[in-house]
Amino acid sequence: MSSPAAFHRFRPHPWHGLTVGKDAPGLVHAFIEITPFDMVKYEIDKESGFLKVDRPQRTSSLPPTLYGFIPRTYCGQRVCDLMPEAKSGDLDPLDICVISERPINRAETLLNARVVGGLPMLDDGEADDKIIAILDCDYQWGHLDDLSDLPNVLVERLNHYFMTYKLTPGQKSCVSIGAPYGREHAEKVILASMEDYTDAFPPGDRRKG
């Protein structure tokens, strides 16, 4: 019989080797790539599963929340269909922003996040939804059930960050964000991304990013 340590000899790929969470879509796992203290944009390397530097943040705007993705999700045709203006999904895992009262300053962290809503972001014609969630069991925010329960300023800060984080002086922005949506629609987006993932990465073929 193998020892317990044998099951942890190799690190699982954060996108494919972790799970979406047994209580999805309302309570999901979130793998954090960026913290509110980061002036560099990090993202998962799809091939290796390690965190890599994408680019320094060009503006002084910092992410107002923890930012990462939900494992075993994929923004494909079903996610695209939920955003009428989109021509396709962005073919990445579904992004998630997690609000926490206590500062969490480490990336590559896995946490439980309770979904409350989202932002319908369109990036160069591709559906790039930003799910908004609360750190599960958070003592300050944990009682909230829907995006409408959050202070408007928190949603405004997220909106501003995503409208400016790719901004290049002298060039027209390719990003637009529609009206924020609540928990019910956010859960539909998550379920769609889970189904898109199953189509894109059938069981037994989940090593490719």
Image (cartoon, rainbow, N blue to C red):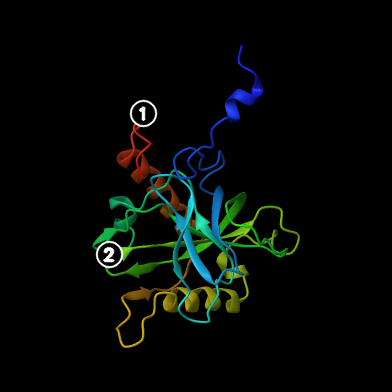
Q: Position of residue 124 (x, y in %)?
A: 28, 70
Depicted 197 relative to depicted 76: above or below: above
In the image: residue 86, left or right of residue 157: left
Secondary structure state at the residue bearing disc 2: loop
Residue 27 disc label: none
Which residue has dot 2 on it? Answer: 86
Secondary structure state at the residue bearing disc 1: loop
- Residue 77 seen in render: yes
The residue located at (31%, 40%) in the rendering is 199
List the single residue furthest toward the left: 87
- Residue 27 seen in render: no
Proximity of marks 1 and 2: CB atoms separated by less than 8 Å: no
Q: Residues within 10 Å of mark 2 (few under 14, many from 20)?
A: many
> Nearest the camera: 70 or 38?
38
List the single residue furthest toward the right: 139
> Nearest the camera: 3 or 137?
3
The residue located at (41%, 62%) in the rendering is 129
Disc 1 to disc 2, C-alpha distance: 30 Å
Which residue has dot 1 on it? Answer: 204
State which quarter of the image contains the N terminus. Answer: top right
Which of marks 2 and 1 precedes in the sequence? Answer: 2
Q: Residues within 10 Å of mark 1 (few under 14, many from 20)?
A: few
Q: Position of residue 40 (x, y in %)?
A: 51, 69
The residue located at (31%, 88%) in the rendering is 170
**Dot 1 amino acid type:** Gly
State which quarter of the image contains the C terminus. Answer: top left
Residue 167 falls in image quadrant: bottom left
The residue located at (51%, 57%) in the rendering is 68
